[in-house]
Each structure stands twice: as structure tokens, then as C-alpha cells.
Amino acid sequence: MKTKLFVITPPFTQLNTPYPATAYIKGFLNTKNIESVQADLGIEVILKLFSKKGLEDLFNYSRSKTQYPTPNSQRISALQDEYLKTIDPVISFLQGKNPTLALQICQEDFLPEASRFAQLEELDWAFGTMGTQDKAKHLATLYLEDISDFIVECVDANFGFSRYAERLGRSANSFDELYEALQQEPTYIDNLLLSILKERIETIQPTLFLISIPFPGNLYSAFRSAQWVKKHHPNIKISMGGGFPNTELRSLSDARVFEFFDFITLDDGEMPIEELISNIENPDYNSYKRTFLLEEGKVVYKNNSLKHDYKQSQVGTPDYSDLLLDKYISVIEIVNPMHRMWSDGRWNKLTMAHGCYWGKCTFCDISLDYIKIYEPVAANLLCDRMEEMIAQTGENGFHFVDEAAPPALMRALALEILRRKLAVTWWTNIRFEKSFTKDLCLLLKASGCIAVSGGLEVASDRLLKLIDKGVTVEQVAKVTRNFTEAGVMVHAYLMYGYPTQTIQETVDSLEMVRQLFEVGVLQSGFWHQFAMTAHSPVGLYPEKFGVIKETEAIGTFANNDINYTDATGIDHDKFSFGLKKSLFNFMHGICFDYELQDWFEFKIPKTKISPDFIFDALQEDDDFNIKPTAKIVWLGGKPFIEHFTKSKKGNSWEMMTLTFHDKKESFSIQTNKKQGEWLVEMLLKISVSNAKIYNYQEVKANFESHLEDFELFWYSKPIKTLREFGLLVL
């Protein structure tokens, strides 16, 4: 019997865009002509719940179950007619289908308001910079969050928009608590999920049910889904894959997990799934790739397949068909500009390169394949995939979900986008390395790059060295300036509580961050507290980093986050509120003149960082030496040419004025006739629309075959002007 797959992401991940794992798998299955259907059950549950019928059922259920426990839930219940009247138009507006509703929402007498709206006064500054659509989106988001609070208080304490019962999935070394929860009657939200799942399973009639679990917040509903299918359709085989098992379940030994799942696959899913299909179609096949299963009541890990994993060029283009692309909802929860991009707008997700080209950071899971195995995708193939996805989804926004996008590949991709004249918008994650010159940042911007995020981690050179980040604070400052000046937004991931980090270093790190925002080279950031993971160098060799694991015992279920004690004995938790509050203000361009002490309710030492450290770092001149192999690219168009004669003291020269029309403005340069003619011809050759890319040595040699003193010409005023308007050295 031919295998048919049903591939799902269980509730909940994002509201605005599908998590890409199922689309990646479906794209691969297409290359093998294997029939599959995918679904994001998270968005389907949300749409069923946040509808007029869904809220009617919810309010009826809440009345039968409880006295309203808080004034807030009493208020929402009292206003239920207002919620029923407004919910469908608001969801439609957040789906981008009802833009005129923004005007009514912004008048602030249209939506019923509960406790979430109490924070509005603090956000007046934000609305000054937001347009009507954005303000309305934010108000509509608060409205949905009020309803979410009501659900948590009165119906299902585990509910959350982008996670469900996350507590049960976080650091679940033992399966006991989750197993116990699964023996209880399904909750109200569970029943919504299972009603959708029932309909889908009966319609599709799959032989293999794949559940992708990216995060701890998807774990509980994944098990609930598997449990229902096992009970009602025991003939369907069920497999788990995704980010959660890849990092957390590598030492799984609890046999009870296989009451719900037949298989759990690790790392890249393509080959393991293909082998599963072969095993299902032929019970004697017995060849598995990175797969856990149960044999004679014991959990076994099988990796006996002789087949190699597929190359990135062979896995096909992510396929988003079957997903409800026009029904995702854009929300603006918080006004952090980078976090907002995660939750607002529809993004096609792609990967430039599998793994990380750096692969050394000591806090990172660099021992696992998803980081360790680095394999870039050719720029022309990436562009082919982008064009296919635009045609399929109608969306031209791309989020490249790389661990760290390689600068050389970003350059090649940008050149290919420009050569094909694609109008796209994209953003990605990077390392703040010196390859990101001013000109490369301008090229990336010209190709549609609007934002980058990268790890500054602990803004201390000693700790950056211990992390093996391969950057210095000074270098980060220069790179963030290059992106900012090119018009690309920069978000920094910040870390505190790294092993051996002193209080002084935490204070000095905050001062560095304050200065980066004050000079305007950073627009967004987020502080994370260090977490020790089992597959990172810190977790594998804790003694090298001055930390001691609290236990060497390996749990029978999830094993990733490790509890430890730091030799410094510092309570890093206490810094959390002050670090986040200061950053919140810095992001909005205020409070730079506050003493660092003002952010903390306990005594901290004065910073040892010079108040002008970042400013001074940015004053240093860049190296003007150009490598012979540097690529020379012209982003502008053809000039309009005028000839004239210049006379001085009886001598005359034939001259040219070249007038260029940039998108924003027009400008002119003047040269002598011979240089002008050469320049016009060369600009056509080095135009970004040409397939051939010339390097500096080739441009110089071409000039010197006609004229003399190339360096003198290269550093002349006309070329300097062109450099300001899109003549790039890459």
C-alpha cells in the first residue's frame, strides 16, 4: 500500500506566519513524488476559538464551570456581547482584509477594554511613531490578549498564543508530569484541537502521521494529538521530529513515550522519513536513520541505514500549499522593533546555509548536526527557490532562518537578487564580523535587506574571548554602524550570567550597550540569561568554565538545560529587571544620562568603561587599501552625457558632464573626454544587472590599456562622488 503522509505543527507557535518545518518536509517529499498534506493546527485552533461562534461557546462553557475569579474576568464576561460583535471584524482586520477598520479601532470606543489596556498610557510615545494601521494592530492585539487572560483565568490555565502548556515541556527530565497530564480528561482547548484533528484524519486518511515539535510549548499538544490518533486510528504510524526532540530527547529511555509515538527521528528529517516510509511499506526492510523506536518493551536507537543525508541542493523548495496563508493574523504585541517583525507580517522562511560557518561559540549546541554540519546553498538556487515561493504564496518577504548567514553568500545572494531585478524584503541572523563593510551593507540594503540580528552576547572582550565569539566590542560597534548608515535595522542578542562573569563585567556590559544605543548604531536588543545546555562546550566540559553540574544523572525523557553552580556564587537573576528596563528605555532613545545605579535597587559598582569608548572606536579611519580581488559593482543606471570645452590661459580641453538619476536625487560629475568615455563604458560592464562581476585588478588593467595613472583617477573627486551613490567595492 502506498504511503500517504499527514504532517502537522501542533499548537502553538506563531500567529502571523507558519513555522517552516512542515513546508521544508513537504517540499522534499514532492521531489520523491510522495503524497503528503500539511497543516498548522495552531492557527486553525486560534481561528476556531477567536470567532463569534468560538467565543459564544467559550462564554457558555465558562459560565457552567466557574464563578469568575477576578474583577477582570467579571468585566470581560459582562462585556461579552461587545466581544461577540467585534471579534470577526477584528480577526479579519488582523488578517489584512479589513484595513478601514483601523480608523474605528483607533477612536478607542469600538473595542471593549479590560486589564491589558491599562498599560496604554505608558505607550503613548509609541503611537507618536506609529501610523494608524500599526496603532490599530496594537490595540487589537491588546483586545485579543484580554480574551486570552479570560481563557487562562476561567477555562484553561495552560493557554498561551505562541505556546501551550509550555511548563510541561521545559526541562522535563522525567516524563511523569506530562504523562500524568495526558491521563486527565482533555481540556477545553484540547477538545477544539481534537475536533479539527478528527476531521482532518478522516478526510486525509494518512498511513503515516508526522508531528513536528519545534519548541517546548508544542510538546503537550503533540502528545495529545498522537494519543487521539493512537486510540481512534491504531493502524496509522506516528512519528515525532523537529527542534525539541533534536535537542532534548537525544538520550530518551522512557518506554511510555511509545504509547503515543511509533518513531522519533533526530536532526535533518528528509532521509529518516524516507527510511520510515520504506519500513512501513516493507516490514522486512529494517533500515533506519537516527530513529528511536520500541523493541521488546525497550527504547532502542537505530542508525543502521547506509544512505547519506541529502545535500541542501537536493531537498527541494519549501512548499506552503495546504496552509491557510491568507488566514494568519499579524499582531503587534510589544514595540521592540525586531520582536515585532517576528509577529507582524507574513514571511516566507528559507535557509541560506545549513549549520553555522563559525561553529565555535561555547554556549551553543555546536556538537549537534544542525550547527556542526555547514553546507551553504548556491545563490542562484536560493533565488530560484525565492521566485518559486513568491509565485506560490504571493508574498515577497523572506526571513532567512540561519544560525548565522555567511557574509560571502549574503553578498552573492544580494547580487543575484539585483541582477534578476527581484523586489523582495528580507532579514536574517548574522555574526558581527568585519566582513560587513560599509559597501557590503549598502549592497545588502539595495537587494531588500531591512534588518539583521546578531549576538553581541556579553559586551566584554574577556568574555567574548571565553565564548569564542571571534569578535570584539569595538568590531561590533563598527559593523552595527555600517548597517545602520546603510539603513538596515540592527538587533543585538545580549547575555548575562555567563560562567565566571563578575558583577563588574555585567555593569560594564550594560554601559557598552548604553553607548551603542546612545551613538545610534543599535536600534533593538534583548537580554537573555545564560542557560547551560548539554550539547554545548560549557555543558560538555564545565570544569573549563568554572561551573559544576548539580547532577551527572541523565533523565529518562528530556535532557538539554542543565542546572549548575558558578564558582563566582553570584545571583545573576537579580540583574534581570534592571537590564531589561534600561534597555526598554534605551530603545526609545531616552534615559542615556541616567546613572547605571538608577536601574537597580541594590548597590552596583561604577562602570570602568570610558564614557566615550564606543564613540572613539567609531572615529578610527577604515583601511583604504583595496585588494586586487575586490569586486567592483555599480548599482546606478546609465548617465545622461553632455560635452563641453574648458579653456584656461589659451589652452582648451574637451570635457564631459555625466548626469545620473538616483532613486532619490540627481547628481552630476565632470571628467575629461577620454576618462569620461572610459568611465561610461566601464559602468555598463560593472553594472549589477550583468552576470559577469569584475574585480579591482580587472578594472585597473582595463583603464591602463587606454589611459594612465589609474590610482590618481580612482581617488579623484568624480569617483568619490560615484562611491557615495552606489559604486561599491566588495
Image: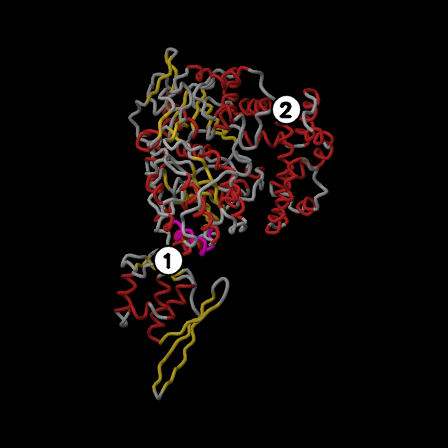
Label 2: element kind:
loop
Note whether residue 277 is visible: no
Count of numbered marks: 2
**Closer to us: 182 or 448:** 182
Label 1: element kind:
loop
* Residue furthest to the bottom: 650
Magenta segment, prevailing SS (helix, strand or loop)? helix
Q: Position of residue 638 (x, y in %)?
A: 42, 66
- Mark 1 = which residue? 690
Residues in magenta, as a range: 476-489
Q: Residue 189 — which label?
A: none
Residue drawn 43% across and 63% down? 725
Residue 632 lies left or right of residue 483; in this view the side is: left
**Closer to us: 549 or 246:** 549
* Residue furthest to the top: 296
Q: Nearer the viewer, mark 1 or mark 2?
A: 2
Q: Position of residue 274 (x, y in %)?
A: 38, 27
Answer with mark 1 or mark 2, whichever residue precedes in sequence: 2
Amino acid at pointer 2? Val
- Mark 2 = which residue? 155
Q: Is residue 487 magenta?
A: yes
Amino acid at pointer 1? Asn
Q: Is residue 372 above or below residue 225?
A: below
Residue drawn 69% across and 26% down? 59
